[in-house]
Every structure is written in structure tokens, then in C-alpha cells.
Image (tube, rainbow, N blue to C red):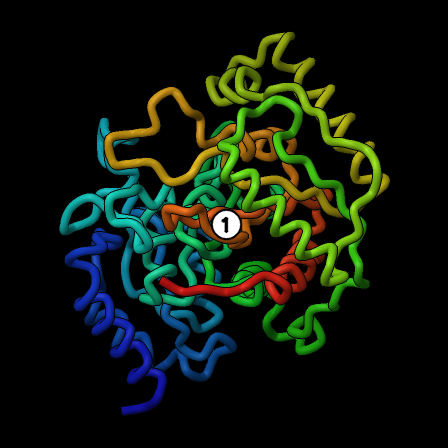
Amino acid sequence: MNDTRDGVRRTLERIDRTDPWLCAFVEVWHERALADAGPARRLPLAGLPFAVKGRSGIRSYAARRLIAAGGVPVGSTSVPGPGTPWQTWGLGAHGRTVNPWRPDRTPGGSSAGSAAAVAADLVELATGSDGAGSVRIPAAWCGVFGLKTTNGLLPSPDRSGLASAGVLARSAAGAGTYLRAVLGEDEDEEEDEPVPPILPVPAVFSPDLGYAEVDPEVAAVVRRAVERLVAAGVVRLVGGACELLDPGGAWSAVRGGEESPAAAEVRRENDLRLDALFARAPLLLTPTTPNRPHGHDGPGELYSTALTWAFNLSGHPAASVPAGFTADGCPVGLQLVAERGADVSLLAAAGAVESALPAVRP
């Protein structure tokens, strides 16, 4: 038996041991994964096991590109069940998906199982899609790395164009592996070496984007993380705030297919403000979510998307990096946003950010 098949077999064994309580997977493909492992070892990803979001995830463009590059899909991960998005945020084969750090809390969604599986070390990466924060929110709440790509960089799974392909990974480097594979750059050895950013990276820090109500403890965790980045020489904060108009109504109008004049004006104004921000700094830092992981009965009146969906509407690439924990043991994410099309540069900056922040596993 070759090493590639051994690695896939160990991945499947971990899933079999852990998923009955984690409930991250809808299906696990034992026979298919072991059969695919042998031929995959000769390709760039060399049989890297990965998971796909939802039952239809295996048909996504990203999954097909990962397979073509030698990735081995081991199963499909949970998404919200029918009619229960606020109760479970993930319904796996064994029940509701739990947060690996706090089983009494949701992992976030809708890429719930993908985030939980990566956080529990079942797979190194899992595909996701992000229409309002569906990659970044579970990444933040499960303490892993999450990337929403620039809108239009990859085929959108959403008719409105708000949703972008994304990935949940243990690190920015893992997300880079995903991005090179789906963009077809694996065969170019020069592309395999990311160009490190020139430090410190000029950045704007916004605790609330000018409109969101943020949990004070979440805000404090993110602020301390930003202070560590400044002290470590990773970022240099530049003057000027990021004051956006609340994009909630505009997002809903676009998603519904009827963008009103008022929604179009909010979108236009926010685009102008973001263009001005990125003209003076290549990086925007915010909390990923305004709240910590909530219980399985739902968030009440809180919108966990308050700080993420602005960038689905504007199209900018955005990532969530683990920033620390609240006193009750809930992970908090730091959101990094870059100019449209600057996905590779964003990952390079995220890698530098990770190096300055403490890494903790569940």
C-alpha cells in the first residue's frame, strides 16, 4: 500500500472516530477515496484528502479543479437542514453539527461542517461558498482560516452573484494550496512560492465599519490582536476610519433580484468609500463577526453577517484569521479585506498575520 493511500485511510479513520459526536459530515466516501488515492499520488496535490460543502459540493468548479490536481475528496460536509437555519446551522448524518471548541454552540454557517471538520483536524481543507459570510463566520467561530475569493474570480454558485467560492483551511498556506489548484497554477513552480509582503503592511482598522453593534468582548479580543500585529511590525495603522453605510437592505434587495434605487445608492456609496480606503492602504482589518458563537437555538435578533456581507456586495476578497478567545472559550476571528483581485496578496498578508498571533488547536 502506498503512502498516499495510507494517508487517506488515516483521514477516514479519524472521521469515523470523531464524526458521531461532531456531526460534520453528511456522507463519507470510503471506497471512492481509497480508490482515487493511488492515481492521485502522481499529481501536484499528491492525494491530499479534502472535504466538500454539502451534497452538491462534489460537482462544484473548485472540487473538480482540486480533483484534477490530485486532491482526494473524502466526503460531503453539513449545511443547514431544511427549515432550520437558526437551530443547527449544520445537519450531519449523525445529527446537528457542533462547535469543536464548545459543543453547546453552533459552528456557524452555512459552511458549518467544513469549518468543524478542519477545526477538529479531520481534513486539512474543505470547500465552502460565501454569500454573506458563510465561509468567514464559521472560520471565525471554529478558530480556523477562511477565505472568500473576489466575486467573479471563480464561478459563483449564486444567481445573484453575491456568493463566491471559498475554502476553510488550517492556515493561509493551506488556502494558498487551494487557490493555486483551482486557478490552475500548480504546474508553474514559480507560482508555488508566494511573494512575502513588505512589512509592515499599511492597514486601516475599523472595529465596526461605522454601523455594526459589536460585542464588547469580541471587539476587545480583536483590538488586542491588532495591537500585537502593530507591535510585531506586521501592520502599520494609517489614518482615517472606515465608515460604511449599513449594507443589509441593499444585500437583501440584490439577493431578491430587485435592486431598488435606494439599494443601488448604498452600494455605489460604499464602493466609493472602499475605493478611497484602498487607495491609501492595501489592507482593511475588522472583527469577522459582531458576536461570539451562539447556542443551537439561534442568535435571536443578532445578525452574525453584519461585518461580512458588505464585501459580498462590493466583491472584495476577505479572509478570517483566528484572533483569540473570549473568556468563555469561544474563538474570535479577525477579518482581513483587500482590493478586488488581490487574493494572492491577501493570503500573503494573512500568513504574516498568522505568524504574529498565537495558534491554538481544540
Give above or below for 39 relative to 136: below
For this orientation, the residue located farthest to the top is: 261
**Furthest residue in direction bottom, as rendered:** 1
Where residue 20 appears, as percent x and y from the top left, is 15, 58
Q: Quick one: SS at disc 1?
A: strand
Front residue of this view, candidates 20 and 73: 20
For the N terminus, the quadrant is bottom left
Q: Position of residue 202 (x, y in %)?
A: 80, 50
Is residue 141 visible in the rendered image? The answer is: yes
Residue 264 in which image quadrant: top right
The residue depicted at 29 percent of the width and 29 percent of the height is 298
Residue 148, visible in the rendered structure: no
* Image position of 197 (left or right of 189): right
Residue sitting nearer the eye, 361 or 264: 361
Classify 266 as above or below 204: above
From this view, report whether residue 254 is shown above or below residue 168. above
The image shows residue 64, relative to residue 214, as above or below, that is below
Q: Quadrant of the C terminus?
A: bottom left
Relative placement, left or right, of 162 versus 143 is: right
Left or right of residue 163, residue 24 in this image: left
Query: Is 165 or 281 nearer to us in this picture?
Result: 281
Front one among 202 and 42? 202
Q: What residue is rendered at 59% in x and 61% in y?
A: 357
Q: How many marks?
A: 1
- Give the residue at mark 1: 166
Q: Quadrant of residue 265?
A: top right
Amino acid at pointer 1: Gly
Residue beneath the point at 52% across and 28% down:
306
Disc 1 crowd, CA 10 A, few/some/many (<14, 14-19, 20+): many
Q: Position of residue 267 (x, y in %)?
A: 66, 21
